[in-house]
Image (spheres, rainbow, N blue to C red):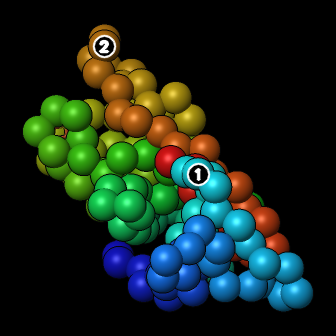
Amino acid sequence: MWVKVPQLAALAPAPGGATAPALGNRPMRRTGPGPRTVCRLSDLVEGRGTLVRLAGREIALFRLGDEVLAVDNACPHRGGPLAFGDQRGAVIHCPVHAWPFHLRTGRCAEVPGASVRTYRVRVQGGRVRVEL
Ligand code: FES
């Protein structure tokens, strides 16, 4: 499932400057690779992954109640799309060869040394923000 992320356009730096459009009354200053809004919590369905693109990366999001976990979409084995895998709680099974990856640590429970990158996610005011 692809999610359109119109918030990204709204938060993009203004041409020629580092200041993004104001949210509410406060101008938002972008000073680095801080958390970026990718979607709303209500866009995510528990038990089903969601693929988003952020800064040229494909990131798979998984909802666990009010918590969201994020990993690189590409399986480290042969690039299977983890967003379309079988989620069981905090474990995602790759849809290609079923390697299981823990969504909090990124580690594969069956293949020592195999892991996928995880991302810190914050849910603030219903917005899902991913830190690169
Ligand atoms: S591509 Fe993911 S387990 Fe093989």
Mark with earlier residue (1, 2) = 1
Compared across the picture, whether 19 is left or right of 124 comes to left
Q: Amino acid at mark 2?
A: Gly
Q: Nearer the viewer, residue 97 or 37?
A: 37
The correct choice, above or below, for 71 with respect to 55 in the image is: above
Vertical order, 44 against 123 (above or below):
below
73 horizontally vs 10: left or right: left
Q: Position of residue 95 (x, y in %)?
A: 22, 51
Residue positioned most to the left: 78
Determine the residue located farthest toward the front in the rendered image.
16
Residue beneath disc 2:
113
Mark 2: few, some, or many residues within 10 Å (few <14, many ≥20)?
Answer: few
Q: Which quadrant of the figure shows ligand 1? A: top left
User: Which corner quadrant of the image does residue 129 belong to?
Assistant: bottom right
Query: Mark 1 = which residue?
Result: 32
**In this orientation, which residue lies closer to the viewer: 69 or 32?**
32
The percent coordinates of residue 94 (x first, y second) are 27, 45
87 and 56: which is toward the camera? 56
Q: Amino acid at mark 1?
A: Gly
Residue depth check, mark 1 versus mark 2: number of the one nearer the observer:
1
Crowding near pointer 1: few (<14 within 10 Å), some, many (20+)? few
Q: Is residue 102 above or below residue 130?
A: above
Q: Marks 1 and 2, Cα distance to the nearest angstrom?
A: 31 Å
> Residue placed at 35% from the left, 76% from the top?
1
Instruction: Identify the secondary structure beneath mark 1.
Output: loop
Give the x, y percent position of residue 107. Answer: 42, 25
Question: Measuring 74% from the left and 85% from the top, which residue is drawn there?
Answer: 22
